[in-house]
């Protein structure tokens, strides 16, 4: 089982460049999430989606956009990369359960992004 | 707003010693609580979760955690630590909202 797959695993960008991170899950999960991980900060939610065609802002959405055109994919875009966006990005997914948004989040292996 | 506090940034224990990692949460509704582990360069793996029922939950790799509503805590324990347990541990709270994570506790294991 592939689970949650993130592409690419590593990337170096120059300030001002754009890029898209792809997350794909094969578990038929309704909910998908993008987090960023920075030293000493834990994981912070960027954007999330509760189903195909939906997106919502998380704790740190500025500078990022997302799209969920297909249920299995969740794309994270950086339109104009800044050094402050240097981070490790994690995608996660979870299945829907009545009364709760998620019962368990399954994580990808992460994308290490450096903006110079 | 919901939040998770992990008071210990870094803990060092000897192999074979017991371990307790602390987690306190703030959540307005019934909390769903999780502990995840992250090995260097890896993603997060679920250790255990609490939704309801028995307040002592068992997880993988010999870990357990106890939910104490009166203390808003969900501490992680292991009776005997192995060198392979060295990693970063994250407590998280969720339910009707996406998971909110603590800042993590890094565990070092010495011989």
Image: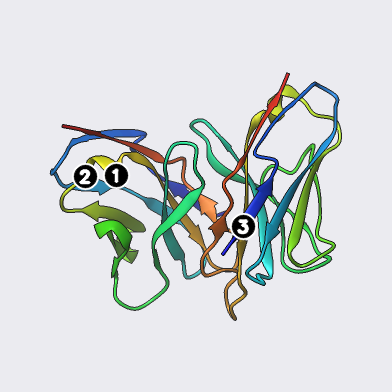
Q: Residues within 10 Å of mark 2 (few under 14, many from 20)?
A: some
Q: Among all residues in the image, which is located at the extreme front?
A: A1
Q: Among all residues in the image, which is located at the extreme left?
A: B16
The residue pinned by badge 2 equals B82
What percent of the width, then of the height, locates residue B11? 28, 35
Residue pictured at 55% horizontal, 43% vertical: A43
Determine the CA span between mark 3 and mark 2. 28 Å
Residue pictured at 16% horizontal, 53% vertical: B79
What percent of the width, then of the height, locates residue A51? 75, 69
Q: Residues within 10 Å of mark 1 (few under 14, many from 20)?
A: some
Q: Name the chain under label 2.
A: B
The one nearer the camera, A46 or A108, is: A108
In the displayed structure, does residue A24 sit left or right of residue B36? right
Is there one chain holding both mark 3 and mark 2?
A: no
The residue pinned by badge 1 equals B85
Q: Name the chain under label 1.
A: B
Is there one chain holding both mark 3 and mark 1?
A: no
Residue A29 occupies which quadrant of the picture? bottom right
Residue pictured at 67% horizontal, 72% vertical: A28
Q: Secondary structure at mark 3?
A: strand
Is there one chain holding both mark 2 and mark 1?
A: yes
The residue pinned by badge 3 equals A4
- Which image quarter holds the C terminus of chain A? top right
């Amino acid at each position: 089982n592939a689970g949650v797959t993130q592409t690419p695993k590593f990337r170096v960008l120059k300030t001002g460049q754009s890029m898209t991170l792809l997350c794909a899950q094969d578990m038929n999960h309704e909910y998908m999430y993008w987090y960023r991980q920075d030293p000493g900060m834990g994981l912070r939610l960027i954007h999330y989606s509760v189903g195909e065609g939906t997106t919502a802002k998380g704790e740190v959405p500025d500078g990022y956009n997302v799209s969920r055109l297909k249920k299995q994919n969740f794309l994270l875009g950086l339109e104009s990369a800044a050094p402050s966006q240097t981070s490790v990005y994690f995608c996660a997914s979870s299945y829907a359960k009545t009364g709760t948004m998620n019962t368990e989040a399954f994580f990808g292996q992460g994308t290490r992004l450096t903006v110079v | 707003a919901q939040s998770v506090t992990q008071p210990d940034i870094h803990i060092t224990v000897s192999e074979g010693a017991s371990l307790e990692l602390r987690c306190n949460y703030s959540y307005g509704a019934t909390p769903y609580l999780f502990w995840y582990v992250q090995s260097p360069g890896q993603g997060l793996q679920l250790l255990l979760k609490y939704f309801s029922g028995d307040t002592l939950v068992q997880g993988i790799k010999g870990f357990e955690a106890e939910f104490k509503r009166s203390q808003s805590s969900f501490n992680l324990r292991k009776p005997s630590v192995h060198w392979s347990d060295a990693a970063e541990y994250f407590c998280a709270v969720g339910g009707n909202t996406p998971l909110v994570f603590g800042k993590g506790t890094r565990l070092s294991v010495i011989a």
